[in-house]
Image: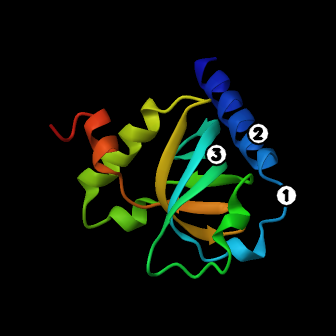
Amino acid sequence: MKRLIKLIVFVLVFVSLSWAVEEQFPEGGIGFAGMLSGKIISKGQDQIVIQVTKVEKVWKHNRAQNPSEIIGKQIILRINPEIYKKKPSYLDKVRKFFSILKIGDTESFDCKHTEGNVFTMLELTELQLKRIGEVQ
């Protein structure tokens, strides 16, 4: 019975995350790499949905022509375990950080555009590492 309940909850979270981000992604944001701020709308396994409130920084390898078009959009921010293969303990830190986030929180994220409305989480800031007890 517990397995069935867990499965139902997982399916509901997955469906709600998918429905939350249906709108067309702005062309000017394709290829974005940098820091985004946003309000957490929902959470799932290794991913969150955020409403972007600000483009804080743009990295040198950014390819987005107009990053400000992302502001106001809902995006899915995912943890991709593949990018942490060489540093598996860092993957645990990123997951720990995602676990402490609450719906309604506003946070900054180092991320890159992957496809559609999906972004990949990259690195944690020093402040975020402190919040999970990884930096003194």
Disc on the earlier residue, 1 or 3: 1
Q: What residue is shown with label 2? A: 16
Q: Are marks 1 and 3 in contact (CB under 8 Å)?
A: no
- Amino acid residing under circle 2: Ser
* Image quarter in which the C terminus is found: top left
11 sits to left or right of 110: right
Residue 123 disc label: none
Residue 100 at x, y = what percent?
Answer: 43, 30
Q: Please rate how many residues cluster around mark 3, counting C-alpha atoms within 10 Å: few if below 14, some from 14 to 19, many from 20.
A: many
Residue 50 disc label: 3
Q: Please rate how many residues cluster around mark 2, counting C-alpha atoms within 10 Å: few if below 14, some from 14 to 19, many from 20.
A: some
Residue sitting at x 57%, y 82% = 63
Of marks 2 and 1, the one in the foreground: 1
Q: CA distance from mark 2 to mark 3?
A: 13 Å
Q: Please rate how many residues cluster around mark 1, counting C-alpha atoms within 10 Å: few if below 14, some from 14 to 19, many from 20.
A: few
Disc on the earlier residue, 2 or 3: 2
Q: Secondary structure at mark 2?
A: helix
Disc on the earlier residue, 2 or 1: 2
Tell which of 8 and 78 is nearer to you.
78
- Amino acid residing under circle 1: Glu
Residue 49 at x, y = what percent?
Answer: 65, 45
24 sits to left or right of 65: right
Q: Secondary structure at mark 3?
A: strand
- Amino acid residing under circle 3: Ile
